[in-house]
Image (spheres, rainbow, N blue to C red):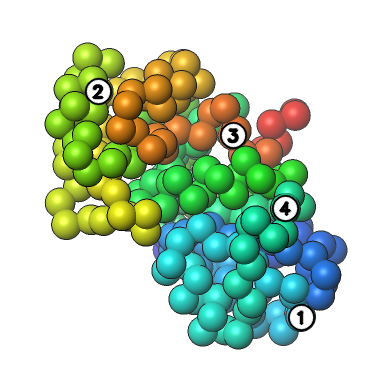
Amino acid sequence: MSQDAKKRQVAEAAFEKVRHLLDSETPIGIGTGSTANCFIDVLAESKIQVLGAVASSKATEERLTHYGIELLDLNATGTLPVYVDGADEADPRLNLIKGGGAALTREKIIAEASVQFICIADDSKRVDVLGKFPLPVEVIPMARSLVGRALVELGGDPEYRQGVVTDNGNLILDVHGMSITDPKALELAINQIPGVVTCGLFAKRPADILLLASDNDILEFSRDA
Ligand code: 5RP
């Protein structure tokens, strides 16, 4: 099965999982990327009238608007019952690397604000140890070199993502060469460097449920299991 077909299938599975929450009074959170886009497509095709969604990026806002789905402000919605988003890597404890699409900061805010975080991906994203995918770090522009040097001290090899400005007006450093055996400790360490907005490790607030599309099946992993 193609990767695109897997993304569509896992988005359909996520839709079935959250369907009972979808009504005209309940806000939901929706992430960024090609898999999250599939979820938006499935939601729109269902024709269910939802209250609206808090989006993790301008790109997601545009897709939701295209389908006539209302954009909601997280400051007005308060806690969200569910957030659906993709990931770049997921480990067995449902710790994630996110930010391949540069939307990590808003993604982390929405994940933190949600009761349940359902992560959807194809099975190529499942790893034993995080770090093969370069870890994205969102950085205030004037701190780019300072943060880069600090990341080298932490054992990484940061690369400036040329030509990318985040929705928050910041830069992305992609950190190569890290074998992330203690994701929570590394997340906290990186987030404490002055000039870092946030890093793409989702370990302090990992996913609650991971749905993975394989060739034949949708695999479901739960953090409580
Ligand atoms: C965006 C993200 C995405 O969830 C991640 O990059 C996965 O994207 P895709 O579904 O296109 O593989 O973190 O910042």
> What is the number of the mark on residue 206?
3
Quadrant of the rendered image containing residue 192: top left
Tell me where residue 211 appears, x and y as whole percent: 62, 48
| Residue under the image location 41 percent in, 53 percent down | 103
* Mark 4 → mark 1, Cα distance in angstroms: 20 Å
**Secondary element at tag 4:** loop
Among numbered discs 4 and 1, the one appearing first in the sequence: 1
Visible residue check, residue 186: no
Q: Which residue is mark 1?
A: 49
Q: Which residue is mark 4?
A: 78
Among numbered discs 3 and 4, the one appearing first in the sequence: 4
Tag 1: amino acid: Gln
Visible residue check, residue 191: yes
Tag 2: amino acid: Leu
Q: Is residue 11 left or right of residue 155?
A: right
Tag 4: amino acid: Gly
Among numbered discs 4 and 2, the one appearing first in the sequence: 4
* Mark 3 → mark 2, Cα distance in angstroms: 22 Å
* Mark 3 → mark 4, Cα distance in angstroms: 20 Å
Are the residues flagged by discs 4 and 2 in contact, CB closer than 8 Å?
A: no
* Mark 1 → mark 3, Cα distance in angstroms: 29 Å
Q: Which residue is mark 2?
A: 151
| Residue under the image location 64 percent in, 77 percent down | 70
Residue neighbourhood size for the residue with mark 2, other residues' Cα within 10 Å, grouped as few (<14), some (14–19), many (≥20): many
- Given this view, does label 4 or label 2 mark the residue nearer the observer? 4
> Is the residue 95 above or below the residue 51 in the image?
above
Residue neighbourhood size for the residue with mark 3, other residues' Cα within 10 Å, grouped as few (<14), some (14–19), many (≥20): many
Along the line of sight, which residue is nearer the eye, 138 or 11? 138
Q: Is residue 6 left or right of residue 27?
A: left
Tell me where residue 55 appears, x and y as whole percent: 55, 63
